Image (cartoon, grey):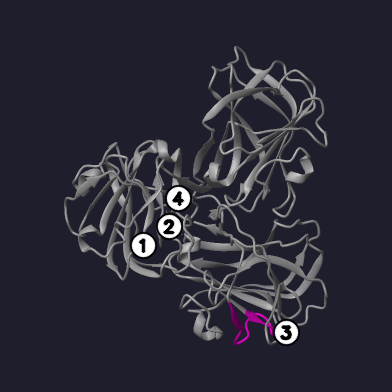
Amino acid sequence: MKLRAKTGMRISVMALSVLFIAVTLISCGGGGGGGGGGVLPSTTPAGTFTKTVNHAGGATSYGNLFSTPTENRYMMLYLAQDVKGSGNIKSISFKNNSGTAAAVTCPNVTVKMGHTSVGTLSATYAANVEEGRGTFATALNNASVTIPAGAAGDYFTVNLGTQFNYNGADNLVVEVTRTAACTDMVAVGANVASPSYNGIVWAITSSTAVTGTAQPNVIDMRFAYAGGDDRVEYPVATGNAIPFWASASEQHAQMLHLASDLNGSGPITGIAMISSEAPTDAASYTVTVKLGHTSLAALTDTFANNFNVGSPVTVAAAATFTVPAGVPAGTPIWLPLSGTFKYNGTDNLIVDIEVTSADTITFWVYDGAIAGRRMYAAVGSATGTVDNGAYHTVFRFNGGPMVKLSAGTGINNAIFNGLDSTATLYSATDLGTAGKITSVSCRMKAASTAASYADFKVVMGHATGSTLSGTAATDFVSQKTVFSGTFAVPAGLLAGDWLDIPLSSSFAYDGKSNLIVWMGNGGTDPGTAVVNNCMGENNATRYPGGLGVATTGVGSASYIPLDWTTDIRMTVQK
């Protein structure tokens, strides 16, 4: 289907539903202590966290992945809803199923990783990757892997040479090939996939096999991240509105998360609660958010006593928090944080939220059967009620850029096309991190074609509202040109890859305002007929007036509002 604006701009649209929607943090490189905490300086290091995928039933093992036969090819699939995380994967770890008395060395090991839309593996390797979700990237190239001595059930780690940027929305493929024998065999643990899907394809005599044996098992895996979004979930998922509630007696809440829930440490730059509404109604609040350490495994009924390791840090002070209408259930909605908290990874973590004004109610995903995880009262009360509410939450550990992915795979062909340009409005609740934006990227709809655009421009600015009016002077708080000049699109990018645009100057995003990114021709005929398309979505409910089309280039006085969004990745420096 194609939409044509009256001025001649072309956008084609193709709808696609997905199982998992996420706003995630991904770095631009590669494919992907103490109590108290504090606000960090501008050179903030990356945080780290680990996610484990281990299905519950039908335990088995695979002895040929790391073994004495010379060659093999193992491809493994992990569903996004099982990984529950996103960001820069720096290492993968396997479970030692039987134990090893001495270290084992495996030379000539290659690891490749990629995004995919498939939900079960085909026996044909090539059918599972590079089908519209990006390049199947080499994360470890022909390297020697040493597996230490260890007991049955221990995990051993394979460090990647290049971090893989996993987006948390697509499913994840991991492939290990080996072209030389290991010094001994190390069997790795696996479980039957539940619900059933082919989670593994193996060929034990060839590293270049075209087809293999597909089985509904999933090899146990740990993914270690250097920066990204740690999605903390509990066994039960139901809905509760405290403290985003109309009753003033329940507008202050403390939420306790154990260190074992997070499995990470380092600077936390964003927090998202997960909507349980299908979809959300528009709502507006004024919130103050504090983070702090505690040694408690269950909250007391006194707010001040629960922060018992160092002092809490205010990361949002009387900030406006606006929940957009139309957000699907299960979507993370980011709080308007302007500060950063350094989590030590050892003590437990308290999220303290005060709501001092509310115009409606929003419900969030939580588990109401875990004792001591929530305490609530009216704002200003010293004590409150402790109960069993554990909120599903996403914690953003510093280390890469913000990414906004839509649920669709429509075509925005107005960024790299003639005199066209598009201004896209992004909600603060879709972004989640304040900082200096130093690059933007669009996700390719199709394989790229080499082209040079002599007058390419990127303008950014905080937005005055939640929709575009069509008049730039009205929509922007202020405009800043962050790139102006020649931009060359390289050949060789695949559909689903990111096209990075390094900016000549940074934009200081405040983390609480909506953001407009205007990209395309600067007003001069680019002198090329080549069009490179970016992914986006046409959705009047989710993105009303979210994209403006200009046929006279970036910086014109007006554009035509459409109900669109464009997928984007932005590098953010703290």
On whether residue 457 falls in the magenta region, the answer is: no
Instruction: Please name the residue that numbered disc 3 is placed on.
Output: 8
Whether label 2 touches label 1, CB < 8 Å: yes
Mark 2 or 4: in front is: 2
Foreground of the two, 94 or 338:
94
Mark positioned earlier in the residue sequence (2 or 4): 2
Which residue range is magenta in the image?
549-562
Give the x, y percent position of residue 231. 47, 47
Alpha carbon separation for disc pair 4 and 3: 42 Å
Q: Dot 2: what SS?
A: loop
Name the mark on residue 403.
none
Q: Dot 1: what SS?
A: loop
Instruction: Please name the residue that numbered disc 1 is placed on.
Output: 362
User: How would you classify the magenta stretch by its main secondary structure?
Assistant: loop
Instruction: Please name the residue that numbered disc 4 is placed on.
Output: 394
The three-letter code of the residue at mark 2 reads Ser
- The structure residue drawn at horizontal position 33% and vertical position 40%, both measured from the top left corner, is 35
Alpha carbon separation for disc pair 1 and 4: 17 Å
Mark 3 or 2: in front is: 2
Q: What is the total number of numbered labels drawn onto the structure image?
A: 4
Q: Would you say residue 568 is visible in this rendering?
A: yes
Alpha carbon separation for disc pair 1 and 3: 41 Å
Whether label 2 touches label 4, CB < 8 Å: no
Give the x, y percent position of residue 176. 71, 33
Image quadrant containing the N terminus: bottom right
State which quadrant residue 173 falls in.
top right
Instruction: Please name the residue that numbered disc 2 is placed on.
Output: 275
Q: Against 510, is 469 above or below?
A: below
